[in-house]
Amino acid sequence: MVQAEPPQLLQVVREPINAGDEARYEEIENETAAACVALKCPHPHLALETLTGPKEIWWFNFFESEEQRLQVTRDYERNRPLMAVLTRNSARKSRYTGQITDQILRYRPDPGRGVWDLPGARYTVVTFGDPVLDAGGPVFEGPDGTHLAIRFFRTLEDAQQLAQDEILMRYRVRNGRLRFASNGFFFREGTGDLYQDARYGMFRVDARGELLLTHLCDENLRPLGNGI
């Protein structure tokens, strides 16, 4: 089987869904999907739903060049019936979503490795930040220096397999930033001076990926005071 090349441009739109509003969001999106089919949406796109952490929908659009991206934009604008539905439903969805982000990223063949095995895939693993160089998938870079590595899998079991040097860690996204566990550390009254040089946290991770902050550490990663 011949593997496809990654696209040169990747548009990533992230829509965080407010807790408890998932059904309302899904109802609007089902209506939008039907309209896209009936009114001949000019460009295919991929929708992804997070399986861990807060519920988010990620939209992927693939382009081979900036010229193609601009042409697709013009094709949408010319399809006035479809644009009317998209505009109306976007306003309706805004009541049920948090802050939406929209980025255009460029393919970086130099740090990336692996294949763009999208056909037949059901699950996607997205790695972002510094670890992308070892993530094992094609890498894309945003205008702000953000890096994403993307791998596609046919089964959930394959997607959840970890390499020997990988650890499953549960995280949350708040205001576009990653949050791991709690940022609070409780210590006994009168022992605050022991932790005044704290710069880092030491965590214990269980099999489910849950993190527990056990120690505070100085700039040389030496534990301070008494852990829990």
Image: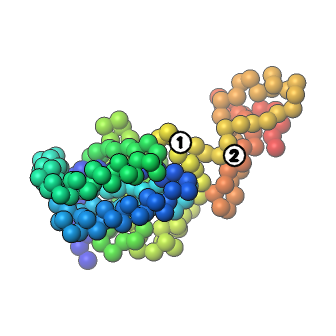
Within the image, what quadrant is residue 45 found in?
bottom left
Q: Which residue is rendered at x = 56% and y = 62% of the image?
A: 164
Residue 125 makes an appearance in the image = no
Residue 174 image label: 1
Quadrant containing the N terminus is bottom left
Q: Which residue is rendered at x = 44% and y = 48% of the image?
A: 95
- Relative height, residue 223 to residue 131 (above, below): above
Crowding around mark 2 (Cα neighbors within 10 Å: few <14, some 14 to 19, many 20+) is: some
In the rendered structure, the answer to whether residue 25 lies left or right of residue 32 reads right
**Residue under label 2:** 203
Q: Position of residue 37 (x, y in %)?
A: 23, 69
In the rendered structure, the answer to whether residue 42 lies left or right of residue 205 reads left
What's the residue type where badge 2 is placed?
Phe
Label 1 or label 2, whichever comes before in sequence order: 1
Provide the secondary structure element on which disc 1 rests.
strand
Q: Which residue is rendered at x = 24% and y = 50% of the image?
A: 9
Q: Position of residue 218 (x, y in %)?
A: 69, 29
